[in-house]
Amino acid sequence: MAMAPKKPYMKSTKVKRSVRLNSWRKNTQNGLMKWKACRSKKWDWVPVKPLPGAFIVNFGDAIENKADEYGSIPVPNVQYLAMNELKEIPSRYIQPKAETDRVSIDESREIPVIDLQELLHGQGGDQMASFHTACKDWGFFQLINHDVTEGIIEKIKGDAEEFFRLPLEKKEAYAQQPETIQGYGQAFVVSEEQKLDWRDIFSLRTFPIAERLAKFWPTSPTSFSETIERYVEELQQLNLRLLELIAKNLGVDADKLTNTCKNGTQWFRINYYPPCPQADKVIGISPHSDASLITLLIQVNEVEGLQIKKNGTWVPVKPLPGAFIVNIGDALEMLSNGVYKSIEHRGAINPERERLSIAVFQLPTSGILVGPFEEVLGNSGAKYKTVDYDEYMKSYFGTKLEGKRALDLVKLGEI
């Protein structure tokens, strides 16, 4: 008999800790109310002993769905559209600018490659200098010898492919709901008139653990949730290691930078780009920068599509086998006072083959203020406002993806 899939790990439940309560029932034998909560990776019934005169308060679905405070207007499933052998692409997906933008054909223009083991154990400062240049001049690099378990990487790739092979009705069991972009759907759709990207996504808020929404964690394929759990835990450690090295290059205490994401938010996202016979007329994901501190992306299959903007030209990225593609996000640009800049990037579409990628976004802790560190101000002073990061995220998700629009609003003059 097949074993039931494991539930995703949430935070263990103890008195006075913040927990996510899922449902309740009354025990008819002893009159004690019991709540179903997550503890030690299992959903258990936890007895509640009411205090005399006290109210027992719980959060309902409406509050749970407001957790993200931003959402996306539902739009047609692109994978389903592509499967129907369209003779004509719906007009909302046709983006004329996709045909006119210049794409580099110079194969020597490739993003830097950084070896993590050389950074950690190499002698001298050459490796750190190369790392600094990659962050400063490119904002993108490929990371090799990163110590993330190869078996976990291959498993997450396989499960992601299997998920998107599921029938539409099974994927829609995890469909996004109002006011959240967790689940299956799209993001950054804020009006009924805007042009649409040629992709579908599956997203989860994976950290903090207490903010996970179990209803979006997939039970098909059966190993998927457990694989996601193991994968994001390893990437969280890799993110922290990279931030420590970045802090060293910026002349900032490592704890000062890593503390910005202590108990911080991490997002997991699968991007699915179906093939399109008129690939030159659509865009997989519109030009944008990420709101994160840093983002780690792996290519699931061998189909290329990621392009970054360098000196006004789109440069295709050719992923190395087993490498992570790492990019600087808006939050790190603000903290570094523009020493390191987030870079616009987009996704191109293949006319014949699907493309999948998996991104993990490391964000600052919810509610903190984000602005330039004193150590990086120099003689020019702050080039960015200090902003509430939650408000920045609302601004970021409240508009269609378009360059660095959200970040431009917090700049102090021309940079």
Image: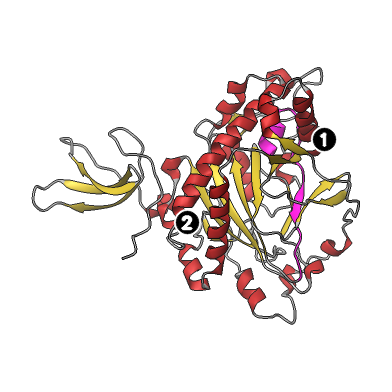
Q: Can you identify the residue that label 2 sits on? A: 224
- Which residues lie in the magenta part? 328-351
User: What percent of the width, then of the height, locates residue 248?
Assistant: 68, 22
Asked which quadrant contains residue 284, the reply is bottom right
Residue 254 seen anywhere in this rendered image of the structure = yes
Indicate whether residue 333 is drawn in magenta.
yes
Specify the farthest residue to the right: 106
Q: Residue at x 53, y 63 (%)?
A: 163
Q: Residue at x 66, y 29 (%)?
A: 386
Q: 290 or 253: which is nearer to us?
A: 253
Asked which quadrant contains residue 291, the reply is top right
Q: 138 or 260: which is nearer to us?
A: 138
In the rendered structure, which amino acid carries the disc numbered 2?
Answer: Phe
Q: Can you identify the residue that label 1 sits on? A: 137
Q: Residue at x 52, y 30 (%)?
A: 262
Other-residue count near label 2 (Cα within 10 Å), few / some / many at <14 / 14–19 / ≥20 = many
Vertical placement of 187 versus 237: above or below?
Answer: below
Indicate whether residue 322 is drawn in magenta.
no
Residue 338 seen anywhere in this rendered image of the structure = no
User: What percent of the width, then of the height, locates residue 345?
Assistant: 76, 49
What color scheme is it? secondary structure
Q: How many marks?
A: 2
Q: 118 or 305: which is nearer to us?
A: 118
In the rendered structure, which amino acid carries the disc numbered 1?
Answer: Asp
Other-residue count near label 1 (Cα within 10 Å), few / some / many at <14 / 14–19 / ≥20 = some
Q: Nearer the viewer, mark 1 or mark 2?
A: 2
Specify the farthest residue to the left: 29
Vertical placement of 197 versus 10: above or below?
Answer: below
